[in-house]
Amino acid sequence: MDPVRNPFAPGAGQRPPELAGRDKEVGAFEVVLERVARGRPERSLVLTGLRGVGKTVLLGELRSMAVKRGWGAGKIEARPDADLRRPLSAALHRAIRDLAVRHRAPDRVEAILGILKAFALRAAPDGAKLRDRWQPGIDVPASSGRADSGDIEIDLVELFTDVAELAQDVGTGVALLIDEMQDLKPDDISALCAACHELSQIGAPLVVVGAGLPHLPAVLSASKSYSERLFRYVRIDRLSREDADRAVLAPVEREDAGITDEALDALFDASGGYPYFIQAYGKAAWDAAPADPITATDVSVAAPEADAELAVGFFGSRYERATPAEREYLRSMAELTDGKDAGVNTAQVADHLKRKPSSLSPARDSLIKKGLVYSAERGQIAFTVPHFGRFLLGREE
């Protein structure tokens, strides 16, 4: 069929043409927005799940919901070993600009921007020369004495409180969305938890919505023992068969096209219900179909092309980040699970490689830090990427 009309374009990894199977999460966030708007305390939200389940897309949807309700909203993506101040400053700058449209006191908005700028400028190390200092692009003078101590925990509590009060002035709130939250540095995680705790104590209208890999709750708990009381944890998984079919049918029908039941069966078998894969195989099947409707044969013909694209962009890009020792560890996991999406005992990996468990700890810890595996429970390890074991077993070394 006409590739120009392909409803699954521009390709896997972009926003899917249909946000299916997330009605529960969207509804829960509606409740959060409403409760905060009424001045009632509400916990922040943490979404966890494997890669490819659509956490980033869902974050974007939640941000849009907040903006439509008149909230200030900013989104960041955490990066390993990167300081939080710079991206957080940019995200809150965006949120304050959202609020400024509705605020009737420009001086008040400028005062909060001055505090934000002071917070941002502390991103430069002490003693850094002027030319090496990052300029946050906030067009007001930096304030002094608030959120600028250099202690991220103290500064974050003060900054969040002030920004939340600005939102309170106009009867709304602020949503700070953090993707790849598990990659925040320990000090930043601790500061974030402390700030959320303070906000919950005073009922301030600022919520954090974090998204990350399945071990994110353990990361938060290791930082602050009370973290389980601060966040509502929501596990995002692959789609049910009904929702996976809707993710395909809705965009196809919007193009006045069709797809057979057998083709839907084939797409679900190939994708496993993971939104990222549904889009990849759906796009390839559309391009391969010579006529309407899309058939199971079209899916079969298209699958190798989708597999090749995923092997480079989704699996390969991650595999290339691993060292030889780490690749050996990954392949051992794949062999022990027969390529299935299942966890494996770390002691089994050591036995399989005929090595002492302690000698494999550096490779395992590095793979966790790179986001390729996670510890499902004590002594267990699993891939963060669905179908990664199958990819490894099919890869020619």
Image (cartoon, grey):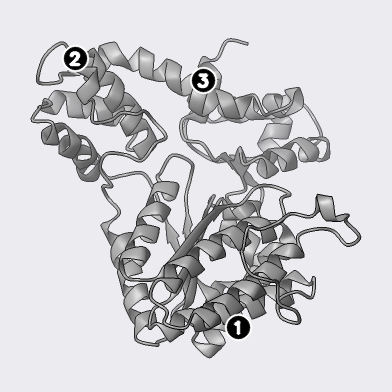
**Mark 1 — residue?**
198
Which residue matches tag 3? 312
Residue at position x 82%, y 50% in the image: 132
Q: Earlier in the sequence, mark 1 or mark 2?
A: 1
Q: As displayed, is residue 217 above or below residue 346?
A: below
Q: Amino acid at mark 3?
A: Val
- Horizontal side, residue 285 vs residue 206: left or right: left
Label 2 belongs to which residue?
289
Circle 2: element type? loop
* Residue 348 visible from this viewpoint: yes
Residue at left 55%, top 64%? 93
Placement of the N terminus among the 4 image quadrants: top left
Q: Position of residue 151 (x, y in %)?
A: 78, 72
**Gap between marks 1 and 2 measured at Cα:** 56 Å
Determine if residue 193 is in view.
Answer: no
Sort mark 3 into few (<14), some (14-19) or many (20+) by Cα contacts within 10 Å.
Answer: few
Specify the quadrant of the image occupied by residue 269.
Answer: top left
Task: Name the residue type under label 2.
Answer: Ala
Tell me where residue 236 appears, x and y as whole percent.
40, 52
